[in-house]
Image: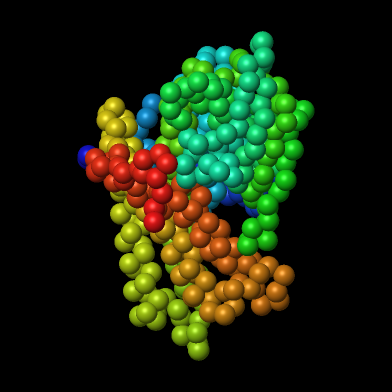
Amino acid sequence: MDLKYSAQHESFRKEVRAFLSAHASRFPKPFGVNRPTPEALAWQALLMEHGYAARTIPKEYGGFGAEGDILESRIIAEEFSRARAPWGLVNQGISMLVPTLLEMGSDEQKQRWIAPTLRGEVIWCQGYSEPGAGSDLASLTTRAVDDGPDFIINGQKIWTTTAHGADMMFALVKTESNAPNKYLGISYLILSMKTPGIEIRPLKTMTDASEFNEVFFKDVRVPKSQLVGERGQGWSVSNATLKHERGMLGDPDASMARMNSILELMRNERIDGECVIDMPVFRQRAMRLQARVMAMRYHGMRLISANASGEDNLLARLIVKLQTCELNYQLSALAVDVMGELGLLLPDSAEVRSHGTWPRRNMFDIGMIIGGGTAQIQKNIIAERGLGLPREPKLALGLTKE
């Protein structure tokens, strides 16, 4: 892969810098938690207009319609990071559902859902995990019974991020009771969160926020036209979504932006009058993490390059979520340590640093090592699917461990 920038690419870099300089006053703060703020929606629209968001999504579905260019994508990421400018909206709808619909959705579904999702007008949540089916997702028990033109859903989902603020859900349900194994008979449905029979109960986490929810379904009626892919073949559709989820959770550009914020924090914080970035213990720790961030960025470029050439580097893809989520936790832990005991203060304290962002991130990052597939499950996936190692043998039915 040739990483040299041509004159055309350097001209493109100047264009991106000029855009960010001209619109710096429009950077949205805050961006919104469960739903984007009006400022964030306006920023998203501006980025889409200039091709800095939804860049390669076809115009017919509301995107910018540009051809994929690895170096242009790299330049956009570098310049946004340099300017500390917010990227466009990143959420489950844009980062997970949209690419799934582009790959496996019907034309009607693409026309109806992609453009408003990209604009941030429709917010989605993911109905996958259940109380008895988290790491072993295929063991889900939420069922959809055939009833003429509709399915009728009964069951429960849990750890459903932003369900209380979402308009729509993409969910996995059992539709075929006689399927020969647990992977067959699962279907992938999209449904409105305003459908009668849906109950949402927020779950408060140690961050003192309620990002996650329980969702209960009681005789929820969903049209069969909202089935994505083939009936009973939702496991293959879900794996496409999970691939994009791992990419979203393991975004190396977001890690680099975080690294840059920490380096700035280290330049401003002092311990006993000495600048933290000049202290060998902290400086060496930061350098080790910075090297890992850079490695993940170049790894990301390798994946983009492989995708552009039609290759599927499975093993390279599989390590992203595991490596980056653990790296992000170590980055936020460094930020907390840089601020010492003050790094543990929450926003309502008079002595709080960085608006209390880093302790919240640190607690959230611990959860992300589990969320989206635990680190242990990710290692199993890497071993079995990426390295071709044999699966752990399962006990015969009726036998238990002593």
Residue 315 percent location from the top left of the image: 28, 42
Q: Nearer the viewer, residue 18 or 126?
A: 126
Q: Nearer the viewer, residue 185 or 23?
A: 185
Q: Quadrant of residue 74?
A: top left
Residue 46 percent location from the top left of the image: 59, 36
The image quadrant where one finds the C terminus is bottom left
Q: Residue, x 53% and y 79% (percent of image)?
A: 340
The image quadrant where one finds the N terminus is top left
Q: How many marks?
A: 0
177 lies above or below 2: above
Q: Residue, x 50% and y 20% (percent of image)?
A: 178
Q: Nearer the viewer, residue 192 or 327?
A: 192
Residue 211 shown left or right of residue 301 in the figure:
right
Residue farthest toward the left in the current orientation of the protein: 2
Residue farthest toward the top in the current orientation of the protein: 148
Q: Residue, x 30% and y 39% (percent of image)?
A: 385
Q: Residue, x 57% and y 80% (percent of image)?
A: 341
